[in-house]
Amino acid sequence: MRVAVFSTKAYDRRFLSRSNADAHRLDFLELRLSPETARLTQGADAVCAFVNDDLGRAVIEQLADAGVRLIALRSAGFNHVDHAAAEAAGIAVGRVPAYSPHAVAEHTLALILTLNRKTHRAYNRVREGNFALEGLMGFDLRGKTVGVVGTGLIGTVLVRILRGFDCQVVAFDPVHNPECAALGARYLAMDELLGTSDIVSLQCPLTPDTFHLIDDAAVARMKPGAMLINTSRGAVIDTPAVIRGLKNGHIGSLGLDVYEEEANLFFEDLSASFIPDDVFARLLTFPNVLITGHQGFFTAEALEAIADTTIANITAFEQHGAPLHPLPTRS
Ligand code: NAI
């Protein structure tokens, strides 16, 4: 198969080339897939895309015209794909449903621990010879209530880790997971979860139901001073509402690995330029906000698994006409 691989960095090339035992022709492109770059797929059988590539209807129609028959996502999330448009165009879509839920769950813990014990600030202080502790006080995680929203693969690993810290775990998910219940997670209604959690962590997919799940009303229902963590998808949070919560002190701290408008920021080095997004720039002014640039997935184990499954999806499509892991059936 000839595959146009969009949004590639050196690490993508390394891991995909290493997994490509089936000798597909991989054309690596640094560009993001968009209406402007879709014409580069001319002659390709498949495109391989990442989280901030545009797979809306307009692009999908261009892909179909170019002869593309498969979209191989290098991600678990598929909220950026117009599934109906792909079906209508006769383009199959494969994804990587599970590469390392541990990678994202452990990164979620990293955000929680850093925000709580303020190690990001301590690091800078100590390097400047400032050993004062004022402003660095945290709390014991033991006994605190953590609300996990979405108890799928990542949520379940997170529940297990949190139980190891002796946290009380409450959960919200339209589908109750017996594994999480067995680990001691107590399922509540979303409003109840918000009202009882010292930390709220979002591990749900972005869907019409979860779009701006955390809005002004949800912020108001949270415990005063609670920590909010989002390692799922940016648009699950209404960022201006959360900024209002930070400004009036209702939200105690915020940890983000994802941001609604991240496509124009993340994965690029903008350090010699400027941040064009005023909402994001406002977030950076809070000492109690910690942002990482969508790196939850970024472990060696996860990259290896992503590359292996992506190649397996492409090979299965070539041999049997369907990827190994198609998108879930549309409801
Ligand atoms: P999963 O499909 O195993 O689990 C998702 C869970 O969310 C399911 O149990 C589902 O029932 C639940 N859910 C659906 N609608 C919900 C709602 N309205 N409220 C609460 N829960 C709801 O997915 P997995 O692998 O656990 O990943 C979760 C999300 O994490 C992905 O969809 C993706 O957006 C994000 N992610 C982020 C990464 C990062 O690098 N930061 C990497 C990988 C995934």
Image (cartoon, rainbow, N blue to C red):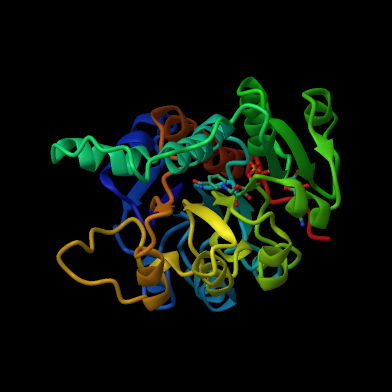
How far from the left and from the top, in percent, is residue 232? 58, 51
Q: Is residue 79 above or below residue 37?
A: above
> Which residue is at the front of the view, 71 or 173?
173
Q: Nearer the viewer, residue 23 or 284?
A: 284
Tell me the residue at 67%/24% (across/down).
Answer: 163
Residue 74 spot, x, y in % from top left: 49, 47
In the image, 312 versus 110, the foreground residue is: 110
Quadrant of the image occupied by residue 276: bottom left
Q: Is residue 94 visible?
A: yes
Whether residue 213 is visible to the viewer of this picture, yes or no, is no
Which quarter of the figure is the C terminus placed in?
A: bottom right
Q: Residue at x 43, y 51 (%)?
A: 294
Furthest-top residue in this view: 164
Q: Position of residue 253 (x, y in %)?
A: 50, 53
Q: Across the whole image, how many numbered discs are drawn on residues?
A: 0
Left or right: residue 189 compared with residue 225: right
**Residue positioned 47% across, 51% down in the render:** 257
The answer to whether 161 appears left or right of 20 in the picture is right
Quadrant for residue 206, please give it. Answer: bottom right
> Whole-percent x and y of residue 225?
59, 53
Using the image, determine if residue 154 lies above or below residue 212: above
Name the residue located 42 percent from the left edge and 35 percent from the top edge: 303
Say if 277 sits above or below 314 in the image: below
